[in-house]
Image (cartoon, coloured by chain):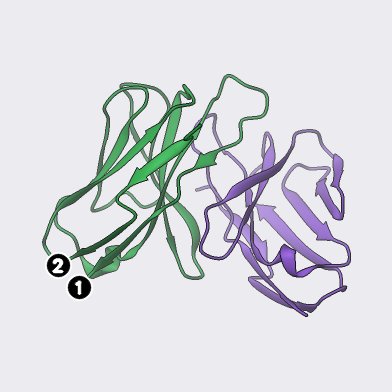
């Protein structure tokens, strides 16, 4: 039972490069999320997707784009990476149809922009 | 906009001492959830509180939801080294937008 899978686990980018972080869940959840975590800043919501075909901005969306490819997959794209985007990125999914709408997280992607 | 603040930001305790973290929201929450993140790991769900004034216990952990549904607390009795990590509350302001608190990092000194 894989749960939420993120790739890659580690990445180093040069300023200005682009990349896509991949996330897939096998729990048939309808909602998916991207967060970034910086030291002392907690988890900040970048974008979320309530259901397949919809995406919405979270707290810190600038510099990012997302795609909800299908119900399983939700990708995060950095078009032109900046050092300020150095962070740990977490993908999460939830099933809003259940009473206990807990979020399940992936293992995280540690991104460094130099 | 919605803000969920936690205090304290850091807490160091001696093993065996108690620990409490508080979560405060600027708006009323329909429910609140608590997560634990071990160092180097990812957040893992602990519990959800829904009712005003609700109290739930998990072994040495006691969770409370305020009467006004704007605050919550997590209390750990007799901390152990396995309690080390960061504790987050999460209170969705809307149905799908899911915001986490700033977190409290707990260190337990043996």
Who's the residue at 82% across and 75% down the image? B15
* In the foreground, A38 or B52: A38
* In the foreground, B5 or B58: B58
Q: Residues within 10 Å of mark 2 (few under 14, many from 20)?
A: few
Compared to residue B83, the image places residue A65 above or below, namely: above
Who's the residue at 87% across and 43% down the image? B55
Who's the residue at 47% across and 35% down the image? A2
Looking at the rendered structure, the secondary structure element under dot 1 is loop
Marks 2,1: beta carbons within 8 A: yes
Position in image of residue B11 (x %, y %): 71, 75
Which colour is chain B painted?
purple
* In the foreground, B83 or A18: B83
Chain identifier of the residue bearing label 1 in the image:
A
Q: Are marks 2 and 1 on the same chain?
A: yes
Compared to residue A39, the image places residue B3 above or below, namely: above
Which colour is chain A painted?
green
Q: Left or right: where does residue B102 sit relative to residue A66?
A: right
In the displayed orientation, state which residue is furthest to the top: A97
- Residue named by callout 1: A114
Q: Which mark is residue A14?
A: 2
Q: Residues within 10 Å of mark 1 (few under 14, many from 20)?
A: some
How many angstroms separate mark 2 from mark 1 (CA)? 5 Å
In the displayed orientation, state which residue is furthest to the front: A1
Q: Which mark is residue B29?
A: none
Instruction: Give residue A34's quadrant in the image.
Output: top left
Q: Quadrant of the C terminus of chain B?
A: bottom right
Chain identifier of the residue bearing label 2 in the image:
A
Position in image of residue A27 (x %, y %): 49, 26
């Amino acid at each position: 039972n894989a749960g939420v899978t993120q790739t890659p686990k580690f990445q180093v980018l040069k300023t200005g490069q682009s990349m896509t972080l991949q996330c897939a869940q096998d729990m048939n959840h309808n909602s998916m999320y991207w967060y970034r975590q910086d030291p002392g800043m907690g988890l900040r919501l970048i974008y979320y997707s309530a259901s397949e075909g919809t995406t919405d901005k979270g707290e810190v969306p600038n510099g990012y784009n997302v795609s909800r490819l299908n119900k399983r997959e939700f990708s995060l794209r950095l078009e032109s990476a900046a050092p300020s985007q150095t962070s740990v990125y977490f993908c999460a999914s939830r099933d809003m149809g259940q009473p206990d709408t807990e979020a399940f997280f992936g293992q995280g992607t540690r991104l460094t922009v130099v | 906009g919605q803000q969920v603040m936690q205090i304290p930001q850091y807490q160091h305790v001696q093993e065996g001492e108690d620990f409490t973290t508080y979560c405060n929201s600027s708006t009323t929450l329909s429910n609140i959830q608590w997560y634990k993140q071990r160092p180097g790991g990812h957040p893992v769900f602990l519990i959800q509180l829904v009712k005003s004034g609700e109290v739930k216990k998990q072994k040495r952990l006691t969770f409370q939801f305020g009467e006004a549904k704007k605050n919550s607390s997590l209390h750990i009795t007799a901390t152990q080294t396995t309690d080390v990590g960061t504790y987050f509350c999460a209170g969705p302001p809307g149905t799908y937008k899911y915001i986490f608190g700033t977190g409290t990092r707990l260190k337990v000194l043996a």
